[in-house]
């Protein structure tokens, strides 16, 4: 049985939701997908079960992703999804509602931030707090951000890429890009349609990225894989072979955007903090950091060492949980109440 004052950290990602419970670690890791009956609005399935239905449902059932580009696109469905995950993580018969910390991209607006808090409260939270993804990622990676030295984090999730320099428990400068794993998948799907006249789904695009995707194709041997889809000319099923070099061509524009954001953050970092970054390097977190060669790509472009966190997928969720124990430290540097020196940019 859980304690009376349960603390929960939620990585409310565009692609996946991770739930961290104090004293138990990460207890839930599921896709942020909900299957609904269009006629009644009833939830049919949530998470992994709903994801298997993407692109495979009959007319009266729709499998949807209620978050897009790191923010809530469908409030009602997000609330139902959060309620399901909180109940699943803590037990549906809670006598005491939990305190919840939810991560948000560094570039969200005040309206988007309030929507996240309100959805968490409606889903069963006693108190709802938010923390920016770079801060949560740094905490989850075990980095000490309380000292007056610079820590640079690049967090690439499903909907956004957040690049930030942190010092004294706050954000010195950050950029949030609406570029993430989903954009990589969409670019691959468009490339296959354009170059091969073959229609494939987003799930196939993700599989291609994970299997043979490479941000630095010149560092290793070229790989290939067979994919199947519907021929746009004949309408019949067809199989083709795609190479890692072609995948790189498909996602190059997205990679360039991430590298450009890293460079811009470095350009706006005060000289004393820049010296710290050269010594300590850049830490990468999020599912996008697992793309083969992306650390090498950023290191080449900046001349700064780049490291991928040990458990890159879980860093943000772990950080949200740890942040609840540091509310008094972080509250003065919350997204809406930063010191005057803090700057941010959304692209």
Image (cartoon, helix red, strand yellow):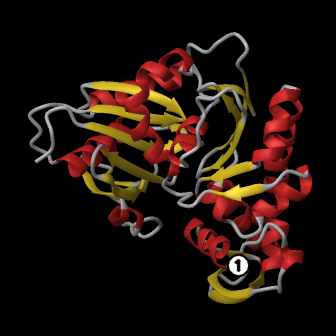
- Quadrant for residue 7, please give it: top left
Residue drawn at x 41%, y 55% is: 33
Q: Name the residue under label 1.
A: 212
Residue drawn at x 8%, y 34% is: 95
| Left or right: where 113 falls relative to 118 | right
Residue most toward the top? Answer: 340
With respect to residue 129, does 184 lie above or below? below
Q: Percent x, y for residue 113?
A: 50, 24
Viewer-nearest residue: 151 or 336? 151
Q: Is residue 66 visible?
A: no
| Left or right: where 261 falls relative to 106 | right
Q: Percent x, y for residue 174?
A: 72, 31
Viewer-nearest residue: 54 or 123? 123
Q: Percent x, y for residue 338?
A: 61, 15
Q: In which quarter of the image is the C terminus?
A: top right
Residue drawn at x 52%, y 20% is: 111
Residue drawn at x 59%, y 65% is: 202
């Amino acid at each position: 049985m859980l304690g009376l004052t349960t603390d929960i950290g939620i990585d409310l990602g565009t692609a996946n939701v991770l739930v961290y419970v104090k004293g138990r670690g990460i207890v839930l890791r599921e896709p942020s997908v909900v299957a609904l009956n269009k006629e009644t609005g009833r939830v049919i399935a949530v998470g992994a079960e709903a994801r298997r239905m993407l692109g495979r449902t009959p007319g009266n059932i729709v499998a949807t992703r209620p978050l897009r580009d790191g923010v809530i696109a469908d409030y009602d469905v997000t609330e139902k999804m959060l309620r399901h995950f909180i109940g699943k993580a803590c037990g549906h018969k809670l006598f005491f509602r939990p305190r919840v910390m939810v991560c948000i991209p560094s570039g969200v607006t005040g309206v988007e931030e309030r929507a996240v808090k309100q959805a968490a409260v409606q889903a069963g939270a006693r108190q709802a707090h938010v923390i920016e993804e770079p801060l949560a990622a740094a905490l989850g990676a075990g980095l000490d951000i309380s000292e007056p030295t610079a820590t640079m984090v690049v967090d690439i999730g499903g909907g956004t890429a957040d690049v930030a320099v942190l010092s004294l428990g706050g954000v010195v400068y950050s950029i949030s890009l609406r570029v993430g794993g989903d954009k990589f998948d969409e670019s691959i799907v468009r490339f296959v349609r354009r170059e091969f006249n073959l229609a494939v789904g987003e799930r196939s695009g993700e599989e291609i990225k994970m299997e043979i995707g490479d941000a630095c194709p010149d560092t290793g041997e070229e790989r290939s894989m067979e994919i199947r889809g519907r021929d746009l000319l004949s309408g019949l099923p067809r199989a083709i072979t795609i190479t890692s070099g072609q995948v790189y061509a498909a996602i190059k524009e997205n990679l360039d955007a991430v590298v450009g954001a890293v460079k811009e953050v470095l350009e706006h970092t005060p000289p004393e903090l820049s010296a710290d970054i050269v010594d300590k390097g850049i830490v990468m977190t999020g599912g996008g950091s697992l793309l083969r060669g992306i650390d090498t790509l950023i290191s080449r472009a900046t001349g700064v060492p780049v490291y991928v966190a040990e458990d890159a997928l879980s860093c943000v969720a772990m950080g949200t949980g740890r942040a609840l124990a540091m509310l008094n430290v972080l509250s003065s540097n919350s997204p809406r109440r930063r010191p005057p020196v803090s700057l941010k940019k959304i692209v």
